[in-house]
Amino acid sequence: MPKLKKKSSRVANEGIIFSYIHPGSKLGVLVELGCETDFVAKTEGFNDLAASIAMQVAASNPLAIDESGISQGILDKEKEIFMDQAKSSGKPENVIEKLLRVS
């Protein structure tokens, strides 16, 4: 953990913004991927990572960028589905409640 704590204070001032437009031009994704140096940002591997993330986002068809963009009704329905799955897997009620608070 000390290594992780030390690295958590670093700032990723460099990076790229990668755009992906799905064939048919009905879906587009922008991914901002940060790193510490421009040397890393200019590598092919870094660009490939951004492209992979963008395509995963496009394939997952997200409802919103973050929780604030999702209606409370949908959030409640998803939490209910999660609770049912957790109960059927045998998780205790107190563990399920803790998991719901984290998510």
Image (spheres, helix red, strand yellow):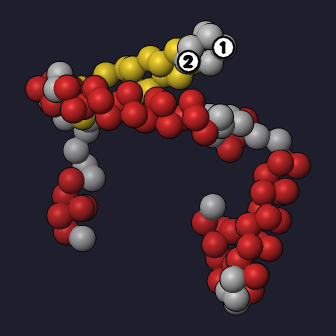
Judged left or right of residue 30, residue 75 is right
Q: What label does residue 51 carry, if any? A: none
Give, as a three-letter code, the residue at label 1: Lys
Residue projecting furthest to the front: 23
**Which residue sits furthest right?**
73
Residue named by callout 1? 26
Q: Residue at x 66, y 14 (%)?
A: 26
Amino acid marked by disc 2: His
- Which of the pair 2/39 is nearer the observer? 39
Q: Mark 1 to mark 2: distance in Å?
A: 7 Å
Circle 2 residues within 10 Å: few <14, some 14–19, many ≥20: few
Residue that mark 2 sits on: 22
Quadrant in the picture for the C terminus = bottom right
Point 24% across, 70% down: residue: 1
Name the secondary structure under disc 1.
loop
Q: CB of mark 1 within 8 Å of CB of mark 2?
A: yes
Residue 70, quarter of the rendered image: top right
67 relative to 50 in the view: left or right:
right
